Every structure is written in structure tokens, then in C-alpha cells.
Amino acid sequence: MAKLTIENLHVSTKEGKEILRGVNLDVAEGETLALLGPNGHGKSTLLNAIMGSPRYVITEGSVTLDDKDILSLSVDERSKAGLFLAMQYPPDIPGVNSADFYKAMMNARREKPMKLFEFYNKLQGAYKAMGIPFEMSNRNLNEGFSGGEKKRNEILQMKLLQPRIAMLDEIDSGLDVDAMVVVANAIVEEEKRGAGFLVVSHYARLYELIHPTRAAVMINGRIAVTGGPELFRKIDEKGYEWIHTELGIPVEKEEESMNQVSIGVCATREAIKE
């Protein structure tokens, strides 16, 4: 059973601004961890740093997958090891055909290239499951797609790759109710397969659909509190101010009184650039 273990992780921007200040967290295959916290406190930074984004510098700590040092691997090697990141803002890739990209990413994990018939069967099944017209596989990757279509495409890639640990960064933002249900169903299918999930969201609705086994709250670049599903429900009702009043942890970068900020309200705002 794969286990992603993060110990004392410190991460800064390339300009030297520290964002993560000693994160300790783990998630194993077969469990889903909800990662919560106000905007600008390091959730996206954590996921991107684990996956190897060049925007960040890891100054201290370790990240392992089955005791294998992930930080020593290139981005593609991290992916081949079983990690997957669904991005908050998937980029357009002009000139790269979607179907060609999916075929290349799947074959990169195989000793022998997948036969064309097998590939198209898998691809058609994934498009059908995600409610995306198969004709979109002929378009360039994400080019001209709506925000919701890009998010569905991220989950489509997850279904094709079947990672051991999937990290989802606000995969539900920009989705209408019907699309959110489609995405949630795809996540649940992978949960049943045994994949582990680290899910960042501001929507209590998504968490209710995918049934996290645990929850953690990131404040000021650290994990402030962990618990069960009751934790995200409490935050949805009370915001984050109780972390200060009950636990004595000040909430930095406070845009307004955090007792006015629920999970749903956070989701309607433009994400603060970290």
C-alpha cells in the first residue's frame, strides 16, 4: 500500500518568501484527506511543491512515497511513481492534440506501447464517464476550453493514468452542480479502486459527495488541526475564527474577520496568488 509522507516541509518562492513552515502530513492509498484553510496559506503551494513545480524551492524537510525520496525525482519520475496533480488553473497547450497527449502519457508508463484499439476503447470510456463529447479529443489540449471543461479534462487524465495518490487542487471550482456530481463520481470510482486522495476545496458539497476519511486545516503554512469529516462541516458553519479563539493560533493574512468566511464563500473569490 502506497503512503505519501510529508515531514517538516519548508517551501519558499524563488524570490525567498517562505510559504510552508514545517508541514507534517501523510495520506495512504485507500483514504481521502480533505485539506482546508483560508486562501493564501499554502495549500496549493504544498501540492505543487510535491509535484515538482519550479516556482518553489524546498529548503528543508522530506517527501516520500513508500519510503522513496520523491524530492530527488524529476516531475515525470514522480508521475511514474504514482503521483498525480489536477491543477487549479490547467494551462492551454497550443499545438498539442489531446488524444496524442493522452496516448503519450499512458505509454510513458508501459514497457510496450498500447495498441491503438485498446487506447481508443479506454479513451472513449473515459470521455463517456466524464460527460465530454469524444470529438473534443481531436482538439488541442485545453485550448479554447471553458474552465469547467478544463477541470473535467484533469479528472479524465486521472482516470486514464489511475495514480496511486492523486492530489486535486480546487478541482471543483468553476463547475456547475451537474458537472460537480460527474467529477465526484469519478473520484469515488478511483477511491473504490484503492487510490489515495489529497483534496483541496472550499466546497462542503464536494466533500459530502466524495466522503473524506480525514481532514486537515492549513494555517500560516502549517497544519494547525486534523480530525475527521466533522472538521470540514464545522468550518463550513463557523469559518476559521474558532482556530484562533479555541486553539490560540493567530490567522495571518486575514482579509476580513474569518468568522465571516465559510467554505462556500471562499470558493466565490479569486484565489490569492501565493
Image: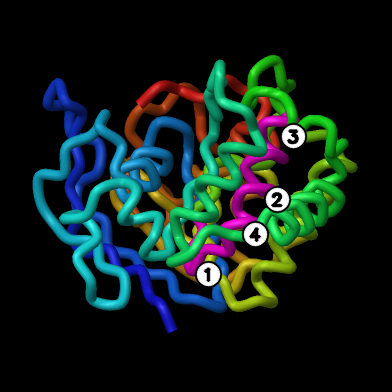
Q: Amino acid at mark 1?
A: Gly
Which numbered disc flags the more N-terminal residue, 4 or 2? 4
Residue range in magenta is 148-166
Question: Looking at the picture, does residue 192 appear above or below residue 186?
Answer: below
| CB under 8 Å between discs 4 and 2 | no
Q: Residue furthest bottom?
A: 1
> Mark 2 = which residue?
204
Which numbered dot is residue 239? none
Q: Nearer the viewer, mark 2 or mark 1?
A: 1
Q: Tell me if 49 is positioned left or right of 176 in this view.
A: left
- As measured in the structure, the alpha-carbon distance from the residue carrying label 2 to the one carrying label 3 is 32 Å
- The residue located at (57%, 68%) in the rendering is 32
Q: Is residue 177 magenta?
A: no
Residue 109, compared with residue 58, is above or below; it is below
**Residue 196 image label:** 1
Image coordinates for residue 69, horizontal then vertical, percent: 19, 65
Which comes sooner in the sequence, label 4 or label 1?
4
Q: Amino acid at mark 4?
A: Lys
At x 31% / y 55%, what residue is drawn?
77
Residue 193, located in which quarter of the rendered image? bottom right
Q: Of the residues tagged 3 and 4, which is closer to the observer?
A: 4
Q: Earlier in the sequence, mark 3 or mark 4?
A: 4
- For the residues labelled 2 and 1, the Cα–Cα distance comes to 19 Å
Q: Quadrant of the N terminus?
A: bottom left
Q: Residue at image x 40%, y 61%?
A: 225
Task: Point out the frontmost of discs 4 and 1.
Answer: 4
Alpha-carbon span between mark 3 and mark 4: 17 Å
| Badge 4 density bin: few <14, some 14–19, many ≥20, Cα 10 Å | few
**Mark 3 packing: few (<14 Cα in 10 Å), some, or many (20+)?**
some
- Reading the image, the residue beneath label 4 is 115
Residue type marked 2: Ala
Rendered location of residue 184, percent (x, y): 75, 55
